[in-house]
Image (cartoon, rainbow, N blue to C red):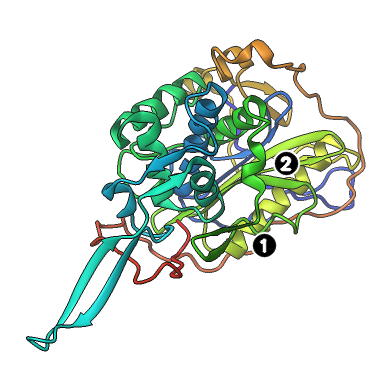
Amino acid sequence: MAFQAAALPALAQTAAPAEPAEPQRASRYASVVVDAANGNMIYGRDEDKQLRPASTTKVMTAYLTFEALKNGTLRLDQELTVSRRAASQERTNLAMMRTNTYKDKKTGKRRTETRQVITKITVENALKGMLVHSANDAAVVLAEAIGGSVEGFADKMNATAERLGMDDSHFMNPNGLPHTRQFTTVSDMAKLSVAVIKDFPEYYHFFGNRTFSYNGVSYRNYNNLLGSYDGVDGLKTGFIRVSGFNLTASAERDGQRIVAVVFGADNPAQRKADMTVLLDYGFAVLGSQPKPPLPVNQNDPADTSEDPEEENAPGFQDTGHVRSLPDRSTFASGLNAHYNIKASYTPPQNITPKETLLLPAPAPEKDLPERKPEPLYIPRSPSVRGREI
């Protein structure tokens, strides 16, 4: 039988809670919660819908950078050359280009001069700039160092995505700037996030830095759950107009780690509020505050027929209210030797709900058209801070 979409978590003070009035979200919205220990999906909403990753793309760029550090191809203190292409990336960036406007003494006309002010950056500073400030120029510097070019690096990104079982993803650049052929799903982003945590624990802390200073400028992390939600220690935000506000986050409490992903929130406040609800629910399911199964939408017609597309989706199985991700052999082919995968999680039965969890009502949805190519933006000084991408 095809797997029915679950409603958002809402728990009343009764043994069998009524279905919540689920707040509406934009068509680009999707979310998922995963048990990082075994890949079990605790909750999903449109988890297989292909959407724009925006700067959550940089999780993949970080994965490949950590891989290069681990195999000795790169060193944290190694200086990398900043190409003109990298330095010219539109914001958010580390202001590697500077534009000065002056008055020509001979003609009296105002003239503009653009020059590259940063030609070298260490791997460590590029990583911090990319993961704290979401710097697009730093991402391209790392990509060119690892792949030889942005295009060569994109090939590595896609090969890694295939190896990790990210079957619904495709990458064209290392920073998530708009491209019609760059897409992923929240399910795939959860797989990638779990893989980063499992494969590179020695470098995962880069996602948890709350501030970063470079070239006389201090930057803060756009993930404002760091320091405000107990247990959150990384990953990455993202935003472009066509994607909405995205976030992949991980948190650990009492030895239990979960990963949650939200794509397509209308604003940062909604993104944070939704992520808080999802993390709370994930820990409640796995921890000391048990919750009943997520209710099924009673307005949906009974599902008595087989949906070939859903039934043939690789590796998914119905385990009650927990929908399992593929086992590790599918989930991360070639990387399963050092994973200790537990059996599928079985939710407790006949439990008493403790509280009500509802996503807040969203702001009215705005029509966000496909982003058109824009002229190259070059900040006027190193202190300019652009919108987070």
Give the mark, 1 or 2, whose residue is nearer the N terminus: 2
Q: Hey, which residue is sitting farthest bottom in the picture?
A: 108
**At label 1, which amino acid type do we have?**
Pro
Q: Is residue 260 left or right of residue 376?
A: right
Q: Residue 279 carries which label?
A: none
Q: Can residue 324 be seen in this view?
A: no
Position in image of residue 258 (x %, y %): 72, 37
Task: Estimate the x, y position of residue 219 in percent, counting from the top left.
Answer: 56, 62
Q: In which quarter of the image is residue 222?
A: bottom right
- The quadrant in which the C terminus is found is bottom left
- Reply above or below: 160 against 288: above
Q: In this view, does 143 lie above or below 328?
A: below
> Residue 360 bears which disc, if any?
1
Q: Is mark 2 on a helix, strand or loop?
A: loop
Judge depth for marks 1 and 2 and give the one in front.
1
Residue 191 at x, y = what percent? 58, 30
The residue carrying pointer 2 sits among few (fewer than 14), some (14 to 19) or many (20 or more) residues within 10 Å by Cα, namely some
Question: Where does the N terminus fall, quadrant-wise?
Answer: top right
Quarter holding residue 380: bottom left
Q: In the figure, residue 37 lies in which quadrant? A: top right
Say few, some or many: other residues with alpha carbon within 10 Å of mark 1 (under 14 / 14 to 19 / 20 or more): few
Q: Which residue is drawn at 80% across and 41% down?
A: 283
Residue drawn at point x = 86 percent, y = 53 percent = 355
Q: Which amino acid does label 2 sit on?
A: Pro
Q: Position of residue 310 (x, y in %)?
A: 51, 24
Tell me: 246 left or right of 88: right
Q: Distance between the residues labelled 1 and 2?
A: 18 Å
Instruction: Examine the rendering and report whether any part of residue 189 can be seen.
Output: yes
Nearer-the-camera pick, 4 or 178: 178
Is residue 28 toward the left or the right of residue 180 in the image? right
Q: Residue 295 has which mark?
A: 2
